[in-house]
Image: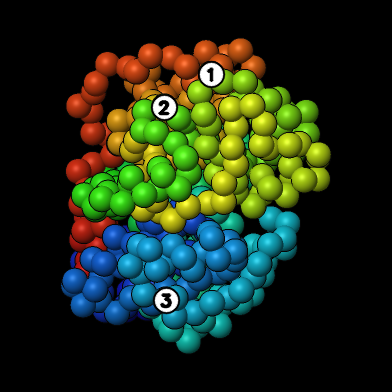
Amino acid sequence: MRGERDRLGAGEHAAASTVVRLLSVVGARPQFVKLAPVAAECARRKIDHVIVHTGQHYETALSEVFFTDLGIEDAHVHLSVGSGTHGAQTAAILERLEPVLTQRRPDWVMVYGDTNSTLAGALTAVKLRLPVAHLEAGLRSFNRAMPEEPNRVLTDHAADLLLAPTTTAMQHLAAEGLGSRSRLVGDVMVDVLHRQRASLGHADAVLARLHVVGGTYSVATIHRAENTDDPVRLEAIVATLARLGHRVVLLVHPRLRDRAAEHGVRLDRGALRSHDPLAYAELVALVDRARGVITDSGGLQKEAFVLGVPCTTVRRETEWVETLENGWNVLVEPGAELVSAASRPRPEPTSAAPYGTGRAAAAALDALGC
């Protein structure tokens, strides 16, 4: 199989033999969510699935608890890289992952999303001449100042098989000459949302614990470097959220907590109430009952869209352009623009399903030849 890779394309490689071992590289909360349906589908098909946790997100609230809540077996390998600069973190993953891949020799290495773990996982596998599949390929913000954007572009150009979530992503890949390696599979986060939404019986308990009433509050998350590292911008965002005319539940990512403390930005004021990150099922329940979402997270934009909750995104661009249709998501700057958007009437209902119907994990494994 190793020698075949030199002369077979990604699609031919997948069809050449039955995949018996898949190795997933994950390290951050959104990747754990994406991993869940893939792991479940591997178990159903009796595929030998090795999970490597890089440790990029190492706090319990953003790491192990997601494995438990999403029903994923514990990672087989923990690299424990922890925090650090982009270069240091990526280098640590490369160094620690190489002996793991050398020993395991999987038929495919799958990387997820756009983090440092994604890029490092792809580079390590490519150097060892192991086939690489990129799940959630083809996303583009066209903003190279975002650390995620180089990760996406470099991973797509290094990978053998590009598993795209949307037709827009497929168009981006084709424009970059990667069409022959690309497959449209849908979005695995829709798989998870369908499963979680079917079991929201505990939603009342979540709302009671947070002292909110359904339909009267917004859920907010702010964590990107562009919004947290600049103290003036961070203060502007927080001050704007605090003066909204309804309760705002701010789920505090570690980056936000650290930067707010460093910059002296007070999170609990006015309409704003901070809370530690929630388990994924609790987050879905909270968003499902909210009047709106305010975020800079790509995943939460999409989750709000699928759940039919209006989203206000504190960014200048988004990878998930489909959410902008019919006003379900709007891009804003802090200040009056954010106040207006977060208070806007509910858009007209939409039947659009640009992220698939909840079978993306199965389609992805089919594309790998499992």
Question: Which residue is the site of mark 2?
Answer: 216
Relative to 233, does residue 56 appear above or below in the rendering? Answer: below
Relative to 95, does residue 163 appear above or below in the rendering? Answer: above
Question: Disc 3 marks which amino acid?
Answer: Asp
Q: Determine the secondary structure under disc 2.
A: loop
In this view, which residue lies farthest toward the bottom? 103
Q: In which quarter of the image is residue 251?
A: top right
Residue displayed at 23% across by 23% down: 350
Badge 2 or badge 1: first in the primary sequence = 2
Residue displayed at 74% across by 44% down: 259
Question: Disc 1 marks which amino acid?
Answer: Gly
Q: Is residue 140 visible?
A: no
Residue displayed at 68% across by 37% down: 267
Instruction: Find residue 59 and report its horizontal and vertical position in percent.
Output: 59, 64
Residue 89 or residue 220, whichever sits in front: 220
Badge 1 or badge 3: first in the primary sequence = 3
Question: Which residue is the site of mark 3?
Answer: 74
Badge 3 or badge 2: first in the primary sequence = 3
Pointer 1 and pointer 3: residues touching (CB < 8 Å)? no
Mark 2 and mark 1: Cα distance apart in space: 10 Å
Residue 128 or residue 144, whichever sits in front: 144
Instruction: Find residue 235 and report its horizontal and vertical position in percent.
Output: 73, 29
Instruction: Find residue 334 and report its horizontal and vertical position in percent.
Output: 63, 21
Instruction: Find residue 115 and report its horizontal and vertical position in percent.
Output: 55, 53
Q: Is residue 128 left or right of residue 199?
A: right
Q: Is residue 345 left or right of residue 348?
A: right
The crowding category of the residue bearing disc 2, from other C-alpha atoms within 10 Å (few below 14, some 14 to 19, many at least 20), is some
Q: For the image shown, how many numbered marks are present on the structure?
A: 3
**What numbered label is drawn on residue 245?**
1
Relative to 341, does residue 126 appear above or below in the rendering? Answer: below
Q: Determine the secondary structure under disc 3.
A: loop
